[in-house]
Image (cartoon, coloured by chain):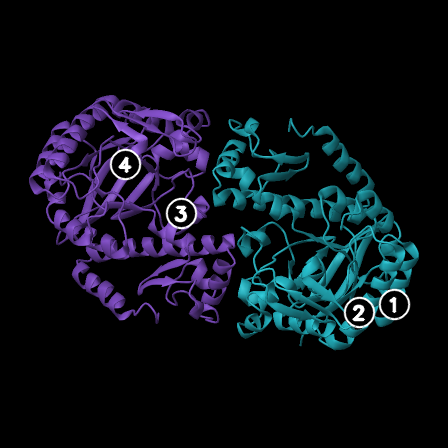
Chain colours: A cyan, B purple
Amino acid sequence: MTQPFSFRCDATDGRARTGAISTPRGEIRTPAFMPVGTAATVKAMLPESVRATGADILLGNTYHLMLRPTAERIDRLGGLHRFMNWDGPILTDSGGFQVMSLGALRKLDEDGVTFKSHIDGSKHRLTPEHSMEIQRLLGSDIVMCFDECPSLPADRDRIATSMELSMRWAARSRAAFGDRPGHALFGIQQGGLDRDLRAQSADALRDIGFDGYAVGGLAVGEGQDAMFDVLDYAPDQLPKDKPRYLMGVGKPDDIVGAVARGIDMMDCVLPSRSGRTGQGWTRRGQVNLRNARHADDPRPLDEACTCPTCQGYSRAYLHHVIRSQEIIGSMLLTWHNLHYFQELMAGMRDAIAGATFTAWQAGFHAMRADGDIERI
Amino acid sequence: MTQPFSFRCDATDGRARTGAISTPRGEIRTPAFMPVGTAATVKAMLPESVRATGADILLGNTYHLMLRPTAERIDRLGGLHRFMNWDGPILTDSGGFQVMSLGALRKLDEDGVTFKSHIDGSKHRLTPEHSMEIQRLLGSDIVMCFDECPSLPADRDRIATSMELSMRWAARSRAAFGDRPGHALFGIQQGGLDRDLRAQSADALRDIGFDGYAVGGLAVGEGQDAMFDVLDYAPDQLPKDKPRYLMGVGKPDDIVGAVARGIDMMDCVLPSRSGRTGQGWTRRGQVNLRNARHADDPRPLDEACTCPTCQGYSRAYLHHVIRSQEIIGSMLLTWHNLHYFQELMAGMRDAIAGATFTAWQAGFHAMRADGDIERI
């Protein structure tokens, strides 16, 4: 029998909480950070290496996969898990966010969005029903509603109109998703930076009923202060007994602040993308390995880090391979960054479970404040 | 006490032979294929993955490393092994071949070569003495003489003049290398496609005395027939009790033909370079994974292959990630190709040890003849 999808909260500390999401493909320890595997690969990583960093779940992008290699092809090949050789849970976004980001290349109407592929200019259409079908073909474990996400700043009317459309699409997504034991459908709260609109959106989603709820429409240029202002109330507007997912976040201090405000799940391309441009994330802050000051430095990127990169390679080596544009530079830095992000999550889970999260946060910030980025 | 460098031949079958080179950093089973780690990395591979393919030794390029990050820097950082996290033996070339390939950017005289860096145009000079010093700073286990290698075709006078210069440089290399227990210096036979010049070169090298001997000046455009013609006599002109190394070879059928003619060591960028361009090497021949016919193919690249790529991924996936220019495409195909090349060497070692090398070769060629490249 297929196990159901469920969420349990094991402990809270302030507004922060820790627990686990159970899926037929394994447990997701929360708060969880999901590495992004846009085109059926977490760039520069083998899936077993992603697993070794401590990741329980990956994110896949509907927009990219529907265009290449297409959802139908992935379905014929046995689904996304088999295709990309990852047997853990996968969350897929709805395609909405990426399509909306296409700007002039897309056209919105009540029913859905017509857009042109960034790859070959071919014309495509996404509706709530089509997005559900694509995510079903991919075999996604956690499916996201199709929504519209306006960029900020935007006036209240624009935000309200957009949020209301997203709520109608959420109802259509729910209807199209149907009943799929072991698979989850998450709703997405919208409403910009407006508390009332956020509350209306939360109520609408709760009425429809979902297996989890995302705080959407943030991390789109509003800045950390504005994002935290929304997170001061938005998670509490959503059902307590379901996981809360903050989409597209973020930097380590964004993540810590979000967890402190009751977020259970996050995803971001940051650790992998910045790994490919020579940026290393550490307890003490961000280190640019391209900088000439690393050329003769025999120390690892972070002496306290247990990842294979820090165990086997000097900053001098990382500097050399990044400057030489060697693929191993992307491989090693992505591995380190993903390891660091997962270690951050594990540290927070332990601290929340032990009711020491306030002290943990103070330590996190003190370590960074101490880290003059040019000296670490 | 540092173990000496030594070579033993365990078995012969026809002119083919199998055995091992002992070095303080481990044994090199022969015939051996050496993956190329040009800039202190076998491109798109972690060193532990290179080891997992069955490689006992890597090749590093003096030319590339002297320019970036420089031999002096690698020395300060503890040597090339520590720098690139590879604890097995490393053979370094002398820089000669790559410098000669610079064409108009280099100027040759009796003492050495002056050239301009392909990276930034800066001026450098290599002499036999300087090449020995660089390879010492790198910490190379097997050091190659500094030689000149003319491109073919060339007239006999040009080949003879060049060979004689290389022999004078071989003597200077030997003198500059000195006595370094546990480290080996290999001489390089020249003489183009001329049997007499090859014999003169072999005699000159034998008089100087080396720990191993390379057949140089081949695989420079002369074609397989001409190369095999030289290999029909050249290895036998060299001392029997020392390893014989064919530089820069080659495709699987080049390698098999060379082993059949008494070669013990080879190196080539082919498996790694072609992995980065979507080419897979298999028992049956070469497969271009970019080809659209693979887009829906659920089979692995080679159903009989035990490498992680063939165990975990379909041709459809490889096609997708190569077309999408994802780094994992280079990682997976390079791994498979290096695995295949090492498996080829292991198969030959076993066949020679079991005195079944003739039958093994027939099987190798039959499998390939059977493999219509468009159908495998």
The numbered mark, 2 or 1, whose residue comes first in the sequence reads 2
- Asked if marks 2 and 1 touch (Cβ < 8 Å), the reply is yes
Residue count near mark 3 (Cα–Cα under 10 Å), binned few <14, some 14–19, many ≥20: some
Q: Any mark on residue A170, and which?
A: 2
Cα distance in 3D space between marks 3 and 1: 57 Å
**Quadrant where the C terminus of chain B lies?**
bottom left
Q: Mark 4 points at which residue?
A: B97
Residue count near mark 2 (Cα–Cα under 10 Å), binned few <14, some 14–19, many ≥20: many
Residue B154 picture location, percent across and down: 16, 40
Q: Which chain carries label 2?
A: A
Q: Do labels 2 and 1 share a chain?
A: yes
Q: Which amino acid does label 2 sit on?
A: Ala
Cα distance in 3D space between marks 2 and 4: 65 Å
Q: Name the residue under label 1.
A: A204
Q: Are marks 2 and 4 on the same chain?
A: no
Left or right: residue B126 versus residue B231 is right
